[in-house]
Amino acid sequence: MHNYPLTVIGLFMFASSILCLELGYQVTVWVMNRRGKDPLLKRALGSGGRDYLLTAMLGLMALLLGFTFSLSLNRFEGRRDLVVQEANALRTIWDDTQLLAEPYRTEVSTQLRLYIQDRLQWSTLYAGRENINETHRKQKELWKVVAAAVKTEPVEPISQSLLDATSHSFDIATSRLAARSATIPDRVLNVLFLYILLASLMLGEVSATYDGLHRVTTWLMLFLLTLAILIILDLDRASDGVITVSQQALMDLHEIMR
């Protein structure tokens, strides 16, 4: 599901659930008409046992929805925490750089600004191979000037702090890439989608036993289920969608460095 736009997924999921709902409804109505609306048959179709089965299925589906939502929300929070950690590490590099002698202070500061610009661009774009290679190139350039500055820095605590902060920021960048690539397994989403279709089928069957009195309410429930799935997918996606991780920490740091 991660390869398709959210709009396409939402429309397909809602249309499929409505189709299963109407299929269950029409098949049940056909069976009832075929039997001449036998009171015994209608009573059997609307028995409490069938309602209990539907309730159990909806309860299990709600459990799966809650579990999947928790997974996607935890991944979203993890990506947001990594942004703050990276901003803190880059701020440490900036502070240590201001203690360097010229011309290394200017050289490291310039490369650091370019690197942060690249990180901001990477955060808002799809992490394709070209973007990853550009980040690696910026890291090599920043490390080159940092290493040159450290070799001539007489104060060891400053040089050690600068090296540690630079290395730590690169590690966080790798962690952010891994966090962006990690998504909810498609098998989990497929099972959840299958449950929605089966529940829609049973909803249509039960709705037919009540002469379709609750069909509008059922449509609304399926629409809300579709919205819930879209929210889960939106939280799980790092580079597209409506819900995105704020890059304000990096943006504030970039403003400070101007």
Image (cartoon, grey):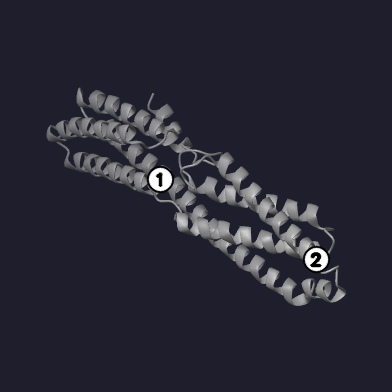
Element assignment for label 2: helix
Query: Type of residue at label 1?
Result: Arg
Say if 19 sits above or below 206 in the image.
above
For the residue pair 59 and 203, the one nearer the viewer reads as 203
Q: Earlier in the sequence, mark 2 or mark 1?
A: 2
Give the image location of residue 11, x and y in percent. 62, 43
Say if 176 sits above or below 123 in the image.
below
For the residue pair 187 and 178, the one nearer the viewer reads as 187
Q: In the picture, residue 143 is in which quadrant?
A: top left
Q: Residue at x 52, y 60 (%)?
A: 191
Residue 70 in view in this figure: no
Q: Which of label 2 and label 1 is nearer to you?
A: 2
The residue that disc 1 covers is 180
Say if 63 sits above or below 150 in the image.
below
The residue that disc 2 covers is 34
Query: Type of residue at label 2?
Result: Arg
Alpha carbon separation for disc pair 2 and 1: 55 Å
Q: Is residue 94 left or right of residue 193?
A: left
Element assignment for label 1: helix
